[in-house]
Structure formats: structure tokens, C-alpha cells
Amino acid sequence: MKTEQQIRIDLAAALRLSAKLGMHEAVANHFSAAVSEDGKSFLLNPKWVHFSKVKASDLILVHADDAGSFEKGKIDSTAWAIHGQIHKLRPDIKVIMHLHPIYATALSCLKNPTLLPIEQNSARYFNRVSYDSHYSGMADQTAEGQRLAQLLQTNTRLLMGNHGVLIGSHDIGLAFDDMYTFERSSQILIHAYSTSQTLNILDDAVAEKTAQDWEKIEDFSIAHFEEMKEILAAEDPSFMD
Ligand SMILES: [Zn+2]
């Protein structure tokens, strides 16, 4: 497992890069990363701080079983409840990223929100996304975190109906690339829908093979994140502070 300091730097980079790509929303949304094997100790971005300003040292260490582990006002209790329960119930998921990016969120608002396999990116998600169709207002209870963890089943991606998307992974770089690719896939699908022409959906066998091919090249996703981190470091290395 990476050191807490390495995790802090990578998580701060992922937050800044998400803002750079316009995937953040105002001063909302949360990313978390476990620093313990059981997932219960995790870092979370501070409440109402713009993603583009977050430094490694700004990330707050909290514990899923200790509601008193966060200083009131410094982190969002909603984020503690939801991220904490998912980290606790799915210790294989070391990183959780939750955003409301435009295209994935638009897809989540359709009656059929399925991320259909129509090209190489969207095929990555074939039969590998859970869908929540029970939006019920702003969530702030551990019960909501438990419900979302159960909805994930064995998946690491949850398209939250009428809301946004949640991506889990065992690695920050992989989660970042998966969020990027999920949003890009949604963008392509929404553009394809907007032509009003019939979609040419890939055969199940081709979609499944493509999804498996993606799973064999995690190093591609890591390289994407490392390249983006280098670009960020050249522009403004303060995320590492
Ligand atoms: Zn949200």
C-alpha cells in the first residue's frame, strides 16, 4: 500500500485535474482514499473548498466508525456518511470519486440511463455499472451509504439516477481514468442520441470482449494519470504541498 503522503499527493492531483477538465461542480462533490487496509481510515477533501485549490496537506483524515473524527464544519457530514459506509462495506474499493459531470449526469436523467456499448469507450462499461433509480433528495445518513454500497454489488461504478456518478477503484490513477472515460463515453452517447438516428449498438460478444480487453490494460490508465500529473506539476506544483 502507498504511504499516506503519496495518497495525499495523488488525491489532491485527482481533485485539481477534475476541476481542470470541468468535471467538478461549484464547491460540491467529494473524493476519498483509504489509508488503512480495512478501508475505515480515509482521506476526504475539505468542505466547500474548490477542487482546483486543494493541497495534499488540506485533505482530512477521518474514520468510518467515528463520527467525531471530523472537525465540524471542515468536512461534509454527508460525504463522511456515504464514503465511510462504502469504504467500510467494500474494503476492496480504496478510492471513491463522486461527481456530477454534465454528460454522465444527463445520462442519469434519462428514463433508460444505461451506458450503451456503442464504441470502444462505452464498451468498457458493458454489464459493469450499477444503476440507482431512487433519488430522494440530498443524502445525509449512514443508511444511504449502506444502500449505495449494496447497490454496487460487485461493481465499482454507480450511475446515480437524477444525480451523478460514483466511481470506485483500488487505485487513485485508475479511478481518475475511469471517471474521465465514463464521462467521455456518456458525452459520445448523448451526442449520438441527439442526432435522433438509430444507435448502432455493438453485439454483446464484441462489447464483452472489449470490456475484458480494457481490464487487461490498467497500465494505460495509470499512464494517463501520471501524464496528467506531470502537466499539472509543470503548471502549478502546489498540489503536492
Ligand atoms: Zn452528488
Image: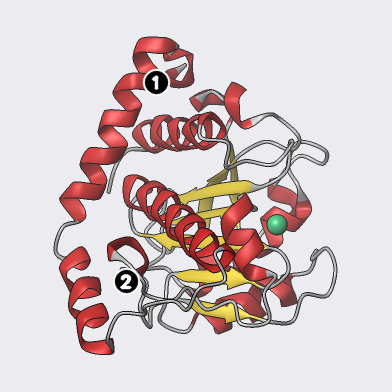
Say above or below: 84 vs 125: above
Which tag is nearer the camera, tag 2 or tag 1? 2
The quarter of the image that holds ligand 1 is: bottom right
Image quarter of residue 107? bottom right
Residue type indicated by callout 1: Leu
Residue type indicated by callout 2: Ala
- Disc with the residue nearer the chain's start (2 vs 1): 2
Which residue in the protein does label 1 denote?
232
Residue displayed at 38% across by 83% down? 127
- Of residues 85 and 10, which is closer to you in this image? 10
Say above or below: 51 vs 232: below
Which residue in the protein does label 2 denote?
123
Residue displayed at 58% across by 56% down? 103
Q: Is residue 21 left or right of residue 211?
A: right
Q: CA separation, marks 2 and 1?
A: 29 Å
The answer to whether residue 99 of the structure is visible from this angle is no
SS state under label 1: helix
Residue 222 position in % (x across, y down): 24, 44
Say above or below: 225 vs 180: above
Residue displayed at 57% across by 71% down? 196
State the count of labels: 2
Q: Is residue 162 left or right of residue 72?
A: left
Mark 1 Cα within 10 Å, few/some/many (few <14, many 20+)?
some
- Of residues 158 and 172, which is closer to you in this image? 158
Q: Is residue 200 left or right of residue 110?
A: left
Image quarter of residue 98? bottom right
The answer to whether residue 163 of the structure is visible from this angle is yes
